[in-house]
Amino acid sequence: MESLFAVLVGVLVAAGVFLLLSRTIIRVVLGLAFIAYGVNLAILTVAGLRDEAPPLLTLAGPYVDPLPQALVLTAIVIGFGTTALLLTVALRAYQVAGHDDVEAFGDGLARNPDAPDGQYADPEHLSPDQPEADHEARS
Amino acid sequence: MSGIMLSALPLAPILTPLGLGVLLLAPMRRGWQVAVALASAVLTLLFGLSLLGVTAGGAVLVSELGGWPAPFGIVMTADRLGSFMSVLAAGCGVFTVWLMAARPDPVREKHHSFALTSFLFAGVQLSFLTGDLFNLFVAFEVMLVASYALAVLGSTREQLREGFRYIVMNLSASALLVVACGLAYGTLGTLNFAHLAQRSAALGPNATVTAVGVLLLIVFAAKGALFPLGFWLPGTYPALPHATGAFFAAVLTKVGLYALIRVFTTVFNQDPDLPNTLLLILGAVTMLYGALGALSQREWRRILSFTVVGSVGYLAFGLGLGTPGALRASLAYLAVSVAVTLALFLIAAVAEQAGRSRLVRTRGFIDVLPLLAACFLLCALTVAGLPPTAGFVAKYGLVRAGLEQGSVLAGVAVGSALLSSLITLYALLNVWRGFFWGRRPRENPVGAVPWAERLPAYLASALVAALAVFAGPLLGYAGATADELKNNTRYILGVLGSRPVDLPARPKGDEVQQPKDGHTPLPEGPP
């Protein structure tokens, strides 16, 4: 059982890393989700895996350690929140750039700091790619 | 103070910004928002100071959540190091809220930038005061989720670009932290710092424990921006608004460094050779990387961000030396670095406004802002480590400890420290020459900077000067903290009590518990 899970964790993390190295933003997000699942399974494996061994003291034993399951629960909730946030950022970048390649974010080190980079892109307003006049016309 | 008050005190700096942050989510006028946010920051600082006062004698305060004693329940622990860091972070928080209040930003404030800043404070305080490895992960996530939101709030193109990189980098590091927590639990059967320390001491030097330690080193190196993993930092911090950028720069990398200090002194101190060697190498490279990076940039806050990277390198160097003297100097340098980074970013906030550009371009501002020029010179000398500043005192201690330790690697690191100090000095004097010195061209108008925005920069610089004047007490406190960290029995006894922790025997399955309400237990066998 443990070796099966070890292989499973390895496959999940490998798939996650492969996706993470992609140029498409949504694949990066999915890759991080894969890694998070692999990690959660790893914690579950640490507790020891046995058939017919519930983490409940009201049932007849043998028992597994319930603590890693609580840890996994916390990790799942946190992973859910961060994935949602990352998806929002990805969506925003897609709206701004019109495509979902990481090129949407550009390579920043040699840019002109006085370019219109520092404009607001409020959800209620137009994206920063629009000229300044449109911002004022809308607001 | 009474016992109940004392046992609740480590929770106070965490719950205050958390609760007031939730309150800040409610719609209210800007004046009220500013008042509540300022109250949250100031109250956190006051609670932090009282923690510092109580733990100054070497007491270890413990808050047991839900009344469950360590190691079974989650505990909040405040020792000398924790309360020291708590005060530093809370002090930076007050300046941040002040600058946010002085510089209205309707778009970001509409999307709860005050509340998010308060949550950020709560996360930072939680990471300094928690006594549990998994809770440290939760604290990091609370802090980072707030910082992710602040990093992309306003969603300018630059913020999206740098924010995405920042989020992806930190999420990967967090996944690694969860794995390290799982492995630590699998090897040692506990996650409480004190209990981990006790059990790893009972186990002796062990390859698996060392592996967990190195895994944690990678995680915290990524969060604290040590060399190969710190590429995200110099881009992210300049993309933020000035006020939050100052807090990020001054405190967030230091949280990673705090975790490194905690893990490698209090918890896994059985087999220090491998982590110390890694820290020395990474520290030596990071110092040079930060100094050369600062030299290569032409923008105010990019230059300063690279000096932050450099300061992380010095701290890793001090921690990697591993002697009590080096630890003492690193803790003093930690305080100096937090104060001077805060001051420099606040100075940059004024300078960018006055020069109407993010570039260090227009010269001759010494005529317009003479006091700011004086503050910048003081901070530049502190970062470079020249006398008569506090930076000199701390760096002198580090270099002396490096020479005393005497290994070849330490010698190389000392050389790197001295060389990168020199390069940093040159980079910062370039800023001085390019912005303050010389004759101001007539055609460039000076942007108006109100007093309310200038005052935080001056006060933070005064704090840097005060650290130089009170370097003696600072070093004394740092020395006491280093002694406490080197000998972790006091921490273990403070958290676990004097009795040895007896874990119940592994359950066999015949001790079925009767539910309290009189129902018979469920039938046996798999459901």
Image (cartoon, grey):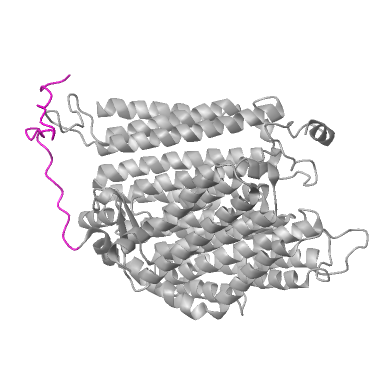
Q: In what quadrant of the picture does the C terminus of chain B appear?
A: top left
Residue at (73% x, 54% y) in the render: B299
Corner quadrant of residue B423: bottom right
**B1 or B481: nearer the eye?**
B1
Quarter of the rendering containing residue B377: bottom right
Residue at image coords 18%, 28%: A53
Residue in front for this viewpoint, B375 or B409: B375
Rendered position, B152 above or below B416: above
Query: Does B338 lie within the magenta span?
Result: no
* Tally of marks: 0
Position of residue B478 measured from the top left corner of the image (x, y, whole percent): 43, 72
Q: Is A118 left or right of A63, judged from the image as shown?
A: right
From the image, give the main secondary structure of the stretch colored magenta. loop
Taking the spot 12% from the left edge, 38% from the top edge, the residue there is B507
Give percent across and percent down for residue B263.
Answer: 37, 56
Residue B416 visible in the current orientation: no
The answer to whether residue B487 is above or below residue A55 is below
Residue B114 visible here: yes
* Rendering coords of residue A22 (x, y %): 57, 28
> What's the magenta region?
B498-527
Work out whether residue B70 or residue B216 is closer to the camera in this orientation and state it: B70
Viewer-proximal residue, A91 or B35? Answer: B35
Q: Is residue B478 above or below residue A41?
A: below
Residue A87 at x, y = what percent? 56, 29
Q: Is residue A106 left or right of residue B519?
A: right
